[in-house]
Image (cartoon, rainbow, N blue to C red):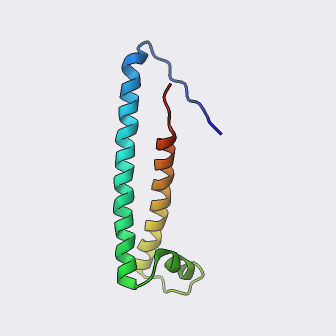
Amino acid sequence: MLQEITIQTSNAKRLKPLIQSAIQFQLDDVEKGIKLTLERLKSFEKQYHMSTAEFLRRFKPGDLEETLDFIEWQGETKMLALLEEKRDALKDARLK
């Protein structure tokens, strides 16, 4: 469902490119964060010889010990989900 945000200004021609630029800057920043997070996840996968999906399947019910690395690994998966959600919201934004 599309939602609309209204910004009132006396100079829309100047404000619109500023908003577009801010959205693009934020999108670029989020995409960099996603890339770094994916690299971190791959590092954990290589170190522990299992995929992130396998790790989560085993970690949540307590099959794996709660080490600092495993807590960080889980945190990285949550960070990735948050960043992907932000990326999708920013990509979906349209200015009229």
Q: How many marks?
A: 0
Q: Nearer the viewer, residue 63 or 94?
A: 94
Considering every residue shown, the one lying at the far top of the view is: 10
Name the residue rendered at 49%, 86% in the picture.
65
Residue 21 to residue 50: above or below: above
Name the residue rendered at 34%, 40% in the picture.
25
Residue 48 falls in image quadrant: bottom left
Residue 16 falls in image quadrant: top left
Classify the position of the N terminus by image quarter: top right
Residue 4 to residue 84: above or below: above
Residue 51 to residue 34: above or below: below
Left or right: residue 65 compared with residue 14: right
* Residue 6: x %, y % from top left: 55, 24
Considering every residue shown, the one lying at the far right of the view is: 1
* Residue 4: x %, y % from top left: 59, 30
* Residue 94: x %, y % from top left: 50, 33
Q: Nearer the viewer, residue 47 or 60?
A: 47
* Residue 11: x %, y % from top left: 41, 14
Name the residue rendered at 43%, 17% in the picture.
12
Residue 62 falls in image quadrant: bottom right
Q: Nearer the viewer, residue 52 or 76?
A: 52
Name the residue rendered at 34%, 54% in the picture.
32
